[in-house]
Image (cartoon, helix red, strand yellow):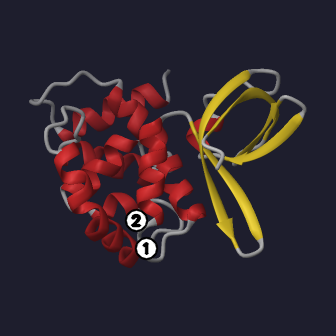
C-alpha cells in the first residue's frame, strides 16, 4: 500500500523517524543503522517501506535500500520473528553479515543480536538458507572464520556488532593477518590514541 516515502525528517528517535510528506507526518520504524546515517531533523530522506498490518495496528517500517527491505520481508516469514526482531537484526548486522551467517550456517552471529536466541537463529538459517545461498555464495564481501572471531572478540569487549563490523571493514584485506593482529588493529581503529 505504502511502498516508498520521500520527505523531510521532522523528528528522529533511536528506533523511528517522523517523515513529513506534503502536510502529513508518517511515523516510520527504522533500524538503528538508518538513524545513524540521518543527520537529524530538517534533512530530506527517501525510504522504501513495508506496511505491517495487524488486527489493531498499522505500522510502517522503512529502509534506505531495497536489499534491506527484501531481507526484512524474508525475516518476517520466519516463525517466531516479528517486525521488532527483524528490525533489530537489520540494525545490528549488515545485509552481507546476515547472508554470511545464513549461507555458512553460523547461528552464533545472529545470537549476538538482542532478542535472538539459539532456537530463533537456527530457524532463521533454516528458513533463509535456500533463499539466500544462491545470492550469497559468490559474494566477495563474505567474512572469514577469523573475521567472525574478531567480531566476537570485539563484542565481548563491549563494542556493538555495528562498531565491530565497521572496524573490520576498515582493516586491510590481508588473508595472512593473524587473529591477534586483526583484533589489535580493530581496537586501534575503535579507540585511537
Q: Which quarter of the picture shows residue 95?
A: top left
Dot 2: element: helix
Work out whether 154 lies above or below 120: above
Q: Residue placed at 47% from the left, 31% from the top? A: 190
Q: Which quarter of the picture shows residue 96?
A: top left
* Residue that numbered label 1 is attached to: 117
Location of residue 186 in the rendering, given as x and y in whole percent from the top left corner: 36, 32
Pick the residue in front: 189 or 99: 99
Instruction: Compare marks 2 and 1 and give the one earlier in the sequence.
Output: 2
Residue 134 horizontal side relative to residue 159, left or right: left
Label 1: few (<14), some (14–19) or many (≥20) C-alpha neighbours in 10 Å? some
Pick the residue in front: 140 or 158: 140
Pick the residue in front: 43 or 116: 43
Residue 56 horizontal side relative to residue 157, left or right: right
Query: Marks 2 and 1: CB-CB under 8 Å?
Result: yes
Location of residue 82 in the rendering, given as x and y in whole percent from the top left corner: 55, 68
Q: Residue placed at 30% from the left, 25% from the top? A: 171
**How much space separates mark 2 and mark 1, taking CA atoms?**
5 Å
* Residue that numbered label 2 is attached to: 111
Q: Residue placed at 15% from the left, 30% from the top? A: 177
Amino acid at each position: 500500500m505504502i511502498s516508498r516515502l520521500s520527505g523531510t525528517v521532522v523528528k528522529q528517535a533511536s528506533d523511528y523517524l517522523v517523515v513529513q510528506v506534503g502536510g502529513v507526518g508518517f511515523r516510520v520504524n527504522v533500524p538503528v543503522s538508518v538513524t545513524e546515517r540521518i543527520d537529524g531533523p530538517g534533512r530530506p530522506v527517501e525510504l522504501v517501506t513495508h506496511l505491517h498490518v495487524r488486527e489493531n495496528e498499522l505500522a510502517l517500517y522503512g529502509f534506505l535500500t531495497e536489499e534491506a527491505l527484501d531481507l526484512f520481508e524474508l525475516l518476517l516469514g520466519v516463525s517466531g520473528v516479528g517486525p521488532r526482531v527483524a528490525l533489530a537484526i537489520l540494525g545490528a548486522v549488515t545485509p552481507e553479515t546476515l547472508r554470511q551467517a545464513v549461507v555458512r550456517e553460523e547461528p552464533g552471529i545472529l545470537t549476538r543480536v538482542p532478542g535472538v536466541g539459539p532456537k530463533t537463529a537456527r530457524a532463521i538459517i533454516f528458513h533463509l538458507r535456500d533463499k539466500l545461498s544462491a545470492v550469497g555464495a559468490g559474494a566477495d564481501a563474505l567474512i572469514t572464520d577469523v573475521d567472525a572471531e574478531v567480531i566476537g572478540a570485539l563484542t565481548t569487549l563491549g563494542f556493538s556488532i555495528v562498531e565491530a563490523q565497521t572496524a573490520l571493514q576498515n582493516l586491510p584485506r590481508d588473508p595472512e593477518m593473524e587473529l591477534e593482529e586483526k583484533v589489535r588493529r580493530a581496537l586501534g581503529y575503535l579507540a585511537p590514541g
